[in-house]
Amino acid sequence: MKIAIGTKDFATIATHGGRTRRFLVYEADAGTAPVEAGRIELGEEEVLHLCGDGRPHPIDAVRVVITGSSGAGFVAHMKRRGIEPVTTTETDPLRAIQGWFAGTLEPAAEPAHPHEHHDGDGHGHAIPSPAGERGST
C-alpha cells in the first residue's frame, strides 16, 4: 500500500499536516521494509488545508497519510478521500511507518493551537493510530 509522510524537508516529519507541502510516498506492507516510491511537492495553493474535496489531488494516490499533527478539517478531508489520517510524535518517516504497522506509533498530543482556521474547521488535532498489528491490503 502507499503511505504518504508529511515532511518539513523530505527528511523529518512535519508538525502540521494541513499546511505541509512536501510528502514522501512509500510503498509498504506489514513485515516488509518500506521503499520510497516518490515525492509530492505542493504549491502554496495546493496544501491540503486549502484543498476542497471535489477536485483531484496528488495525495489521492495513497491509503494512509502520517503527519505530526492535524486539525478536524484535515481529518475530515482525508477520510472523504478514502485516506486514513494518522498523527505521531515520531520524527523519522521509516520508524513512523514501521510503528504504524506494528500498532505502536505514538500519537501526537493536541497542540496548543499555534495556527488559525480559515475554513470553520474546529480543533481535535490528535488523531491516534489504532492499536494492533497492521495487515497488508
Image (cartoon, rainbow, N blue to C red):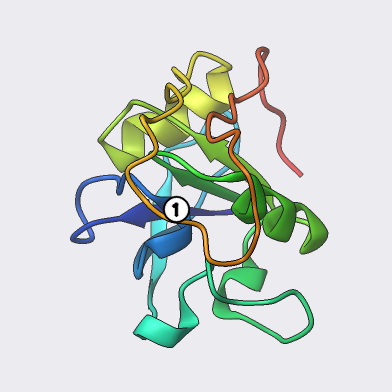
Q: Is residue 133 above or below residue 21?
A: above
Any part of residue 9 in sight: yes
Left or right: 76 in relation to 108: right
Q: Is residue 34 above or below residue 81?
A: above
Which residue lies under the disc numbered 1? 17
Q: Amino acid at mark 1?
A: Gly
Which one is in front, 122 or 128?
122
Left or right: 86 in relation to 47: right
Q: Where residue 19 sits: x, y (%)?
A: 40, 63
Using a 10 Å C-alpha cutoff, classify the residue at mark 1 as few (fewer than 14 neighbours), some (14 to 19) or many (20 or more): many
The local secondary structure at tag 1 comes to helix
Q: Quadrant of the C terminus?
A: top right
Left or right: 75 in relation to 92: right
Q: Residue at x 67, y 20 (%)?
A: 130
Q: Where residue 29 sits: x, y (%)?
A: 59, 40
Q: Residue at x 44, y 17 (%)?
A: 106
Which one is in front, 115 or 16?
115
Left or right: 12 in relation to 130: left
- The quarter holding residue 7 reads bottom left
Q: Residue at x 44, y 39 (%)?
A: 69
Q: Where residue 132 sits: x, y (%)?
A: 68, 13
